Amino acid sequence: MKGSQRPSTVSDSATDGIVRRQSTPKQPEILPLTAAIGFKRLGLALLAAIAVGAGVLVTAGYLISADALRGQVLSEIRSVTGLNPILRGETSVSLFPTGSVSFADVVLGDAKRPALTAERLTARLRFFPLLVGRVEISDVALERPIIAIDQEPNGQSNWSGLIEALTRSQTKDGPRVAAFSEMRIENGTVLVRSKENKVDETLTDVAFSLAWPSISKSFGATGRFVWHDEPLDMTLTLGDFPAALAGNRTGLKLRIAGSPIKAAFEGAISAKPTLKIEGTLAADAASMRNALIWSGQQPLPGGGFGHFAIKAQANVMGGTIGLSNVNVELDGNTAEGVLTFATDGRKTLQGTLASDTLDLTPYVSTVRLLTANQHEWNNARITLDGLSGMDLDLRLSAANVVMSNAKLGRTAIGANLRGGHLVVTVGEAQAYGGVIKGSLTLANFDAGVDVKSQLQFTDVDLESCLGQLFALHRIEGKGNLSFAVEGSGESVLAVTRTLNGTASLVGQNGALLGLNVEQLLRRLERRPLSGGGEFRTGRTPFDKIAVGLKISQGTVTVEDVKIDGSAVRLALAGSASIPTRELDLKGTAALVAADKPEAPVFELPFIVQGPWDDPIMLPDPEALIRRSGAAAPLLNAVRDQRARDAARSVIERLTGAPMPAVPAAEQSAAPAGAQKRE
C-alpha cells in the first residue's frame, strides 16, 4: 500500500544537511594586512625602541659619572694614538640625543712650544655600546686646531717625541683591537717653519678627514687647504701606517689638485736610514710662470713658461730629487732626459734634455734690441730679477731650433746659472748655413746688467746673419765672423755706450748691396764732373772681404777693411759709433784690370757717412777736380770770389746737393785778407 512506502528522499537529504552543518566547526574571520597597517606597526615598534633607548640614555646621564666618562674617553685616545693631550679648558658631556664628550683648549706636546693646540676636541660615542654602559669612541674631531711643525737644525722637530709615542701605540704586539677609525680636522691652520732653510709657510682653512687605522694597517687622509690664497684638494694614502711611523718601507699615494697645479705620485716611502721616496710622478700646470710666482719663486725673465707638464720616475734621497725617464712639455716643446733637483743649501736644478724641435720664440719674444722704428737702440730698462732665485746647470740638444725668424739645425746648448750669473754656452749650432760656437754671459747688478759675449760664426751666410743680429743688410756671401765684446748698463742703449772688444769678418765670393762702385768709378773716370747720378742701388761683387775692428766705449775704430774684386778694390779706415749707429769712414776705390791687378786703372778717394743701415758714399771733390782738365785751374783760384763760386758749383754738380751759403762777413773778409797778403 502507499501508506507503507518509505519517506521521500528530500526529507532525508534535508536531515543529512542539518547533521552536516552541526558537525562543521566555525572558522574565525581573518582581516587582510595592508601596507599602511604594516608601516604603522613598524613605526610603533621603532618609537618604542627609541623611547626605551632615550630613557636608558637619560637615566644613564644621572647614573654615569661625567668624570668617569671623561677618563674613559681620554684613556681610549691615549691607547689608540699613544698621545697624551693636555686639557686646559672645561669638559662637557652629552648623552642625548647622541653621546659625545667635548674638551676645550687642548694641547699636544710641550706647553711652551706646543705641536698642536685646538679650541675643542670632541669625541662622539657609539650608541649601542653606550646602552650597556660601555664607552667606545666612534670618531674624534679637532675644531680650529693650530698645527705647528718646527724643523730643527739637527733634523728633528717638535713632533719627534709625539711621533715616537704614536709609533709605539701602533706597533704593539698582539691582535689589533677595534677602536675609532676616523679623525676630523675642521677649520685648522698648519705652520711649517725652518730657520736653517729659511722656510715659513702657512696653510689655512685646513679641513681633513683622517681614516685612522682601526683593524687594518692602512691610513688615509682626504681634504683641502688654502696655500698662498689658492685652495688645494689633497688625498694621501699609506699602505702600512705602523711601518711608515717606524721608518720602514710602505706604499704611498698622493694627489694634489688646484687651479695653479695638479700633481700625483704613486710609489713607496721609507725613512731609515735616510728619507727615501721612489715612484711615478706626474704634474701639470696651465702656466708654469704663474705656478712659480704662486709658490713664491721668481721665474726667469722674458716671455714663455706657459703650459707645463711632466711625467717621470722619481727617486728622493735626503734633500735630492732625481727624475729619470723624464718626459716634459713646456710651451709646446717636448723633451726627454734626466733631471736632478737639490734642496740642500742653495736650490740647484741639473739635467740633460733632448728634443726633436725646440721653439725658443716665446722666451726671446720680449727681447727688444731696437725701438719700434728699427733705427735706434732700445732705452727701456733691462730686468733680470729671476736670475737669483736658484742655480741651474742644464744641457739641451735639439735636431731643430726655431728662434723668431731664425731657424737653426742640430744644436747643443748649455745653460749655467749660479749666483745671478747666467752663462749660455753654444757647443755647436748649425745656423745661417754654417756653424756657431761661443758663449753669452749675463749678470745682474744694482745699476743694470753686465754683458759678455764671445761668438764664432764659421762659413755662414753673411746677409742673413748680419741682418738678423745687427739689422745690417749690406753684405752678402759666405764667410766667418767673430767678436768678443763686453759692456754694462741699465738698457741696451746704455750697454752700447760702454762696449769694449774686438770684431773681425772674413768673407768671399759675395757683394756689397745697395752700391755699384764699379759703375760709379767708370763714369767718373770718363767724366769726373758728370754730376751726381744715383749710385745707391745695385751691387758691387767681391772675391774677398776682410774687416778688423776695435771697440772702445761704444766707438768702433776700423783698423783694416779691404775688399778685393775682379774689377774693383776698396780700402777703408775711420770710425763708427755704435750708440748712434753712425758711420764716418774714408777710403779709396780703385778700378783694376784683370790682366794687371797690381796697377789700378783709376783711383778715387771717397767718404762714407750716415746711418749704417743706409749710409751715403761721396767721392772726394778735390780728386775729381784735379782729374778734370777744365776744372783743375779752379784749385789755384781760391783768392778770387768768382773762383770760390765756381768751385762751389763744381762740388754741387758732383754731389747733387746745394752747399750752404757763405756768410757775408766771410765774403767781405776774404778779399781783404787777400789784399793784405799781397
Image: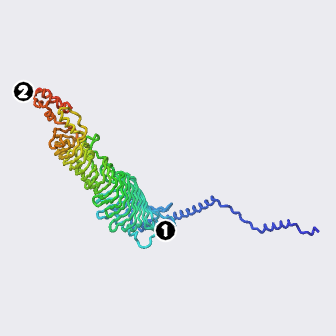
Q: Residue furthest front?
A: 595
Q: Is residue 652 above or below residue 421?
A: above
Which disc, if any, is residue 286?
none
In which quadrant of the rendered view does residue 88 lie?
bottom left
Dot 1: element: loop
Q: Position of residue 481 (x, y in %)?
A: 22, 49
Q: Position of residue 577 (x, y in %)?
A: 20, 42
**Quarter placement of the C terminus:** top left
Question: Is any atom of residue 91 visible in this view?
Answer: no
Of labels 2 and 1, earlier in sequence is: 1
Please name the residue that numbered disc 1 is placed on.
Answer: 134
In which quadrant of the rendered view does residue 341 lie?
bottom left
Query: Which of the two marks, 2 or 1, is nearer to us in this view?
Result: 2
- 10 Å crowding of disc 2: few (<14), some (14-19), many (20+): few
Return the residue nearer the eye: 132 or 33. Answer: 33
* Amino acid at pointer 1: Arg
Q: Residue at x 21, y 49 (%)?
A: 483
Q: Are marks 2 and 1 in contact (CB under 8 Å)?
A: no
Return the residue nearer the eye: 155 or 596. Answer: 596
**Quarter placement of the N terminus:** bottom right
Residue 19 horizontal side relative to residue 441, left or right: right
* Amino acid at pointer 2: Gln
Q: Position of residue 44 (x, y in %)?
A: 59, 61
Dot 2: element: helix
Please name the residue that numbered disc 2 is placed on.
Answer: 675
